[in-house]
Image (cartoon, helix red, strand yellow):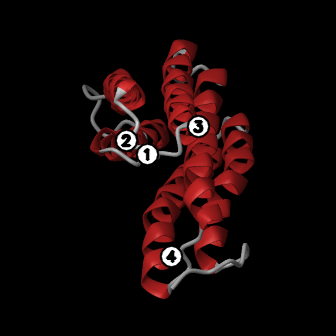
Amino acid sequence: MTSNTLFNPANILTSVRIILVPVFWYALQLNSPSGLVLALACVVLAEVTDLLDGWVARRFGYESAFGALFDPLADSLYRLGAFTALASTGFIPIWTVLIFAWRDTIVTYARMMMAQRGEELGARLSGKIKAIVQGAALIGIVAALSIPVLVTTVDPTNFIPWLYGAAVIVTAWSGVDYLIAGMRKFTAPSED
């Protein structure tokens, strides 16, 4: 069963990720412990909605063509917005955001090329792994910024480069994977 209603529970959950981006930016701009706690709550809530929206759509019959397009758009807007906010406040380097934007652009164009042929380039395992690693990195970075140093020899912020580094590597790998998959499908003989 599919739903043509735009305002269904699955799409509302998806919308939450987009709405949380300016709240996340604002929370980081507060430059305070309470702002960091709010920022952490935003990324945790956003990641929970990412887990729930697809499940709700499948489980309760809210799958739609709009939802299938809206979900990856919301993911990109949320994660690019969150990483850009972290870069704008100096918590991560700006070049990381360029890698994330590069990957999303490649995936979008690979899908557009396939759509011109009347074919589809669906979700790939690399994309799912990328989403998990980016989500974990966002939560980890904001948690590291939020948690006071508990042991004087271990500063949680020392883990931040490892977190965004892992996200960059997996994101770049996913971009290459989609690019290769798109090129293979696009250059394959048409079934017409």
Name the residue carrying label 4: 57
Q: Tell me the CA gap for discs 4 and 1.
A: 25 Å
Q: Which mark is residue 90?
A: none
Q: Is residue 34 left or right of residue 144?
A: right
Q: Tell me the CA gap for discs 3 and 4.
A: 27 Å
- Label whose residue precedes the other's in the sequence (1 or 3): 3
Nearer mark to the viewer, of 3 and 2: 3
- Label whose residue precedes the other's in the sequence (4 or 2): 4
Name the residue carrying label 3: 116
**What's the residue type where badge 4 is placed?**
Ala
Q: Tell me the CA gap for discs 1 and 3.
A: 37 Å
Name the residue carrying label 1: 139
Name the residue carrying label 2: 127
Nearer mark to the viewer, of 1 and 2: 2
- Label whose residue precedes the other's in the sequence (3 or 4): 4
Q: Looking at the image, which residue is at 64% across and 69% down?
A: 11
User: In the rendered image of this protein, does residue 146 appear above or below residue 164?
Assistant: below
- Screen quadrant of the C terminus: top left
Q: Looking at the image, which residue is at 66% across and 79% down?
A: 8
Q: Is residue 128 left or right of residue 2?
A: left
SS class of the residue under badge 3?
helix
